[in-house]
Image: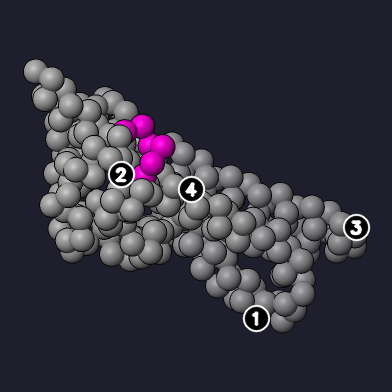
Amino acid sequence: MEKADYVKSYRDKELRQYVLAYLLACIASLGVNTQVSGGKVESFSSITELVSASVFVGAICILSMIFNELWTEGAKTKLAYGRLASDTVFSDIANGKYRGQGFDCDEADEVYIHLIGVSEDKQTAEWNKMLRNCKDAERGNVFDSQRSQLMTRDIFLSTVSLLIMTIAVILALSVSYQDFFIVWKNFWIPFAYLITMLIVTRIAAKNRAKRLVALVIKNDVQDRQSRTKK
């Protein structure tokens, strides 16, 4: 498998599994509530409603994969990170925020002193050059780290998409059944799950992004040390 394909392979694996897990959680929640509230007399009606709601949930999961492709890179960055960790990486190194990341911050501070305080675009552009050098050198740890960074970012964005469409379905079903309480009773568990995952995945996405930035800097510093010794 090509390295570029490996980095994006999470889309067909972890990302789809995450969406599938949400689908199963919704169906399980709907099934439990149908079993609890459905009597023999109303069993056909309950099963019909369960199938109808399950179809809505299935549509949510399919549409979320499509919806993810509509996010622009700027929107993805804003939602997942606020701003890129690479925007202030050299300024952060100077401020000691990357200590304990496996490289000598004092030495890195001297190496990148000309980049401290420059614009965020300039810092990101310089860091991207280092990332490209790491890829050209086929640094396996960088490919693994970038895959994790993109995966956590897209899982977070999938959570946002699922949450938006779940709210839309709750409102639509509430209007259809003219009873918000019944719909909410069936969907509060998936809704709470998404809210929890929204928080968890955003934290994970920001941490993974910072780890990738630090790893690229670490490799660049080590490469400079190796060239100096020669």
Label 3: how many Cα within 10 Å (few below 14, some 14–19, many 20+): few
Looking at the image, which residue is at 31% across and 57% down? 84
Q: Nearer the viewer, mark 3 or mark 2?
A: 2
Residue 102 lies within the magenta run: yes
Instruction: Return the residue at label 2.
Output: 213
Q: Quadrant of residue 134?
A: top left
Element under label 2?
A: helix
Q: Amino acid at mark 1?
A: Val
Q: Answer with left or right where residue 41 lies relative to residue 177.
A: right
Residue 46 lies within the magenta run: no
Q: Position of residue 58 (x, y in %)?
A: 55, 55
Label 4: how many Cα within 10 Å (few below 14, some 14–19, many 20+): some
| Circle nearer the N terminus (3, 2) | 3
Instruction: Return the residue at label 1.
Output: 175
Q: Which mark is residue 65?
A: none
The part of the chain drawn in magenta is 98-103
Q: Which mark is residue 204?
A: 4
Q: Quadrant of residue 199?
A: bottom right
Q: Answer with left or right where residue 138 lies relative to residue 196.
A: left
Label 2: how many Cα within 10 Å (few below 14, some 14–19, many 20+): many
Q: Nearer the viewer, mark 3 or mark 4?
A: 4
Q: Quadrant of residue 56?
A: bottom right
Pick the residue in front: 157 or 102: 102
Q: Amino acid at mark 3?
A: Lys
Image marks 2 and 4: residues in contact by CB distance under 8 Å:
no
Element under label 1?
A: helix
Q: Amino acid at mark 4?
A: Ala
| Circle nearer the N terminus (3, 1) | 3
Pick the residue in front: 211 or 19: 211
| Circle nearer the N terminus (1, 4) | 1
Element under label 3?
A: loop
